[in-house]
Amino acid sequence: MADTDTVLNVSGVSKRFGGLQALSDVGIRIERGQVYGLIGPNGAGKTTFFNVLTGLYTPDSGTFELAGKPYKPHAVHEVAKAGIARTFQNIRLFSDMTAIENVMVGRHVRTHSGVFGAIFRGPGFKAEEAAIAKRGHELLDYVGIGKFADYKARTLSYGDQRRLEIARALATDPQLIALDEPAAGMNATEKVLLRELINRIRNDNRTILLIEHDVKLVMGLCDRVTVLDYGKQIAEGTPATVQKNEKVIEAYLGTGGH
Ligand SMILES: Nc1ncnc2c1ncn2[C@@H]1O[C@H](COP(=O)(O)OP(=O)(O)OP(=O)(O)O)[C@@H](O)[C@H]1O
């Protein structure tokens, strides 16, 4: 595939916490329209990798390219501007704001007046506001919670809060959307709906990176998977090949698996 179709190209990522090498020379490459999975037993380094990629942790080494352009993952807002949006393992919504307000905050990353313009109602704010609200409602409909637009985020069900986080991430028009354990705490019905939603996002030519403990979900959804164990990349490939990899089987059995 041509280089222009590569959305994320990261290599040589290392991160040490004191005496612990949490990541050693990890690299992944994600093509446009792929769902890419990051899996591995507890403590393997998945969250650390996500946090490095999205500017929460400063890496000790690594090169980072998004849609063919180098980016420095040294600050969360810079990463958002570069075009990576993420959700969190522990949902991080503005709980006393409504669903539509939460999505509109995401959208302000991309607008002229910006988040501060929105807060202080600066010049140019009103002109953009109607368009942002319209787009916000479209996104809530898209993730299936349009009818809850005016509900406070904290009153939504767990599954709907996760959908709202995804809508907020989509509102930034990201090159890459990074989902941190999107199925965590969901019941079987919510997982089926989540799977449909992720597939729909992919079919709209979006690119998704996900950490997920639910192996069935990962294997059913992902085009490619990287497996981490003790900070090292022990396998990379399609779910079918990775599943048969001896190192992967050993890593999961060795720790009791998930
Ligand atoms: N801020 C930190 N300070 C010190 N050690 C850390 C920090 N963050 C993570 N670690 C350590 O780095 C290693 C990798 O942790 P990480 O959370 O990335 O793993 P994970 O694969 O996401 O695990 P889980 O599946 O349990 O979420 C662990 O040994 C963890 O204790």
Image (cartoon, rainbow, N blue to C red):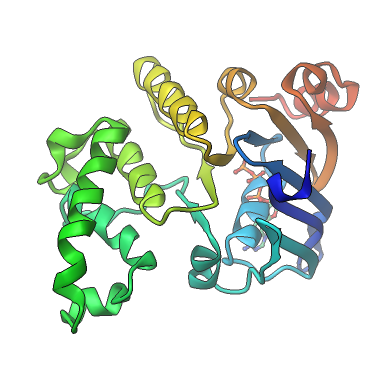
Count of residue discs: 0
Q: Quadrant of residue 44?
A: top right
Q: Quadrant of the N terminus?
A: top right
Answer above or below: position of 20 versus 145: below
Q: Position of residue 166 (x, y in %)?
A: 38, 43
- Left or right of 160? Residue 7 is right
The x, y position of residue 66, in whole percent, is 66, 58
Residue 228 image position (x, y, % from top left) = 77, 40
74, above or below 163, in the image: below
Residue sitting farthest toward the right:
246
* Residue 34 lies in quadrant: top right
Q: Residue furthest left?
A: 150
Tell me if 128 is positioned left or right of 235 in this view.
left
Towards the viewer: 51 or 21: 51
Q: Which residue is pictured at 38% across the width and 65% down the height?
A: 110
Residue drawn at x 69%, y 41% is: 31
237 left or right of 89 in image: right
250 vs 119, left or right, is right
Query: Residue visible at 34% across and 59% down?
Result: 106
At horizontal 78% and vertical 18% (from top left) the residue drawn is 243
Q: Quadrant of the C terminus?
A: top right
Residue 211 % position (x, y):
59, 39
